[in-house]
Image (tube, rainbow, N blue to C red):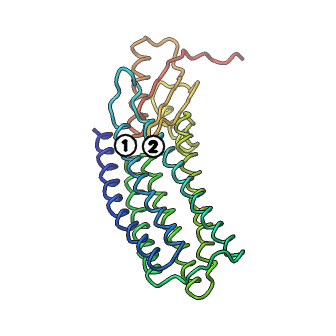
Amino acid sequence: MKVQNNEKLGLRVSRNTIIVNSIISVFKLFAGVFANSTAMISDSIHSMSDSLSTIIVMVGIKIAGKEADEEHPYGHERFECMAALILAGILFSVGIGIGWAGVDKIIDLSKGETVLEQPGLLALIAALVSIAAKEWMYWYTLDAAKKTGLTSLKADAWHHRSDALSSIGSFVGILFAMNGFLVMDPLVCVVICVFIIKVSYDIFKDAADKMVDKTCDATTTAAVRAAILEQEGVIQIDLLHTRRFASRIYVDIEIAVDANLSVVAAHDISQRVQDSVQAKFEKVKHCMVHINPYEPPNE
């Protein structure tokens, strides 16, 4: 039920951001064209890529929310990480494209092969509207990502934040260009490029870590260890492995108990350990507990 609720929340947030983003993208493109701003046109292209990336996120969330089946006994959560990886690739490509356009414009300007027109006030207004809208979309999506634990939703939130940062850059560049520093308009495109590439790397690294079963952070692992040792009958922990499986966690445990206990008594201890870990850590999807007979160290 919780997985289904996460899926519904993620899809609802994604649909809402697509609507808002589409309106903002069209407005920024209109402002960039009619107010003679290269930076604003680049910014609008970045915003348009947001809508495409959000659609990819929605597809990833939908597939990841499917129940386990015969061919996928461990579930479909990793499809959500795949969506985040695709999103990172789109962001990187958009960033390179925007940066290249800015550099090309600067080179032509230095050679005297092009003449830049002074951007108009409409471009500046569009930048301010974009900053406000994209920052709201960032916090709106990030809040949903925290509630659901969905990596792709978090990636989409940072995509919105990168757009807000690029709009800030556009605002500064347009403001300078309006006051005679025309080179600042294409120069901002290069700055936007750097921001986008940095965000794409962060998204890629986070998704890749979850695809290759990277262990949980030290704080989470220590908390799991403490929860195990709290259970009566656990003498020591022989092994504790945690791994991130998309937005969920798998835990493998080996505990030592009194060698003289019956099978039933030992099983009861392992069940308490499993129940405790799954109750205290809601992201734990599966907890495997193995029992070892305690062997005192040789003196």
Which residue carries the number 2 mark? 83
Q: Could you tell me which residue is drawn at 72 percent across and 74 percent down? A: 111
Q: Nearer the viewer, residue 230 or 93?
A: 93
> Residue 96: horizontal and vertical position, in percent?
60, 57
> Looking at the picture, which amino acid does disc 1 mark?
Val
Specify the quadrant that holds the N terminus. top left
On the picture, is 190 further left or further right than 246? right
Instruction: Name the element at disc 1.
Output: helix
- Element type where label 2 sits in the image: helix
Q: Quadrant of the C terminus?
A: top right
Taking the view exactly as shown, the residue that stands out farthest to the front is: 113
> Circle 1 sits on which residue?
59
Q: Position of residue 231 (x, y in %)?
A: 45, 30
**Amino acid type indicated by mark 2:** Ala
Position of 205 relative to 19 (above/below): above
Residue 270 vs 280, above or below: the answer is above
